[in-house]
Amino acid sequence: MKTKGRIFLLDDDELIVTMLGRALKNEGFETQMHTSSQDIIKKIETWHPDLVMLDINLGEDRTGLDILGEIMANSIDVQVVMLTADDTAESAIRAMKVGAGDYLTKPFNVDEVIMVIKGVLEKAKLKDEVRYLRKTRMDHSHHEMVGKSQVIKDIIENAKTIALAGVPTILITGESGTGKEVLASYMHHWLHQGRGEKCEDGPYIAVNCTALPDNLIESELFGHTKWAFTDAKTDKKGMFELADGGTILLDEIGDIRGDLQSKFLRVLETRKIRRLGGKVDLSVDVTVIATTNRELKQAVADKDFREDLFFRLSTFSLHMPPLRERREDIPLLAQYFLDQFNQKYGKKNIKDISAEAEERLYNYNWPGNVRELKNVIERCVVLANTDLIGPEHLPQEICGGQTTVSLVERRKNARLILPENGISLEEVEKDLIKQALERTGNNQTKTAQLLNISYDTLRYQAKKYKLK
């Protein structure tokens, strides 16, 4: 069962410790109880609690204020609630100035304790999220799933069904720029709808697995303890802990190192993580959405990706098709981005996209998919000074390069010289695929684009003709 947090109790009154421990456990918290301050800092650092409840008057040589000072001096990342029998609460207020999050005056009732603990933990969680967002400067502007094609309608319907069911692990595949991250953010929203919660109640942490340096990725994902390595001067929560209660997006998971793949598998199976240098496992209640532009089945066959991790990820998978396979969505997306960038750049004169320019957009193959279309429309909005975006505003590769239509016309006019003894159509098809593979250096994605067929069709034909 997922706990609501880890609470460390220190009070010389065994009755109070036992009573609080039982109440907190019944409320869903994991607790560790102590009545002596011996080795207390080491015990706190080893167990990684979310909150320490600390009695001010311990009846020992040092007080709770002394221990609070040590916690602050050692930069231990933990919230502290002080317990005091002082009616004037002067010492507790002094403790808050040192760094305590709140205090409770004895005698107290259980409801009051629970309310204070939840308040302190929620406030700390919000601070962690703000700190993370400031550090990464993530763009949380609203994106929409735009499209009228049947394939997009089916994807949205399936994604919503999966999310509302509360599935813990989801894989989204597709070429770069197809909108995998946008779909992931939608699924995060639907996940919380399924739980009967507001979207804001759960954090959404996006991690680009290829952007993190190899020597830091484990620390960033799972956190680290103080002095786990040379520069680790304080304990640090990893991104899995920051995403607790929400969603973590692992973008481009197909490119992670082999040793991390085994750790990811363990997290997916147990929903527990261990900080770098840590000695205890920490439970995390997090939905994992992984995305990749790689063909993971091929990566498994090439021994570049663990088969057991692939099966764990792909139980619930969704595939975002390339833009060239849903061309009917191009005009809608172009208009959506036009409206978006008109507003961003304060352009009021640009009203629409001309029919000729729209046709060029429709016929282009979009190797960069939706992301490329978005960039093209942004460029047009910035540079155009007319009321209509025309072909002259489009980049050369779209306006002046070969389009699908021009290629079709060329095929119509092309003539093959037929040998006297005839030739099999299958031989012609096989030879064309071989030539395309050679030209692209066996890059299957580029080969499919060159032949103007889908990736799955190319795979089928390659298998049919036993081409590698």
Image: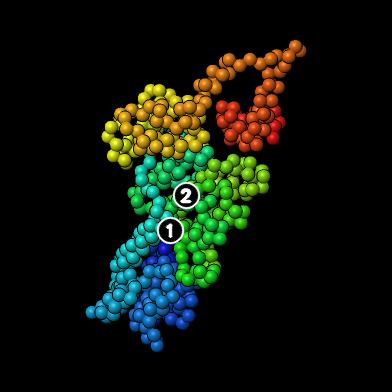
- What is the count of numbered marks? 2
Q: Closer to the camera, 180 or 137?
A: 137
Q: Secondary structure at mark 1?
A: helix
| In-image side of 341 versus 453 (left or right) | left
Contact? badges 1 and 2 (CB < 8 Å): no
Q: Which residue is mark 1?
A: 242
* Residue 281 can be seen in this image: no
The disc labelled 1 sits on which kind of residue? Leu
What quarter of the picture does the C terminus occupy?
Answer: top right
Q: Closer to the camera, 50 or 215?
A: 215
Disc sitting over residue 249 in the figure: 2
Residue at the image position 36 percent from the left and 25 percent from the top: 354
**Residue 339 drawn at (x, y percent):** 33, 35
**Residue 333 drawn at (x, y percent):** 40, 32
| In-image side of 433 versus 335 (left or right) | right
Cα distance between the residues tagged 1 and 2: 12 Å
Residue at the image position 42 percent from the left and 68 percent from the top: 77
Q: Closer to the camera, 337 or 425?
A: 337
Q: Secondary structure at mark 2?
A: strand
* Residue 372 can be seen in this image: yes
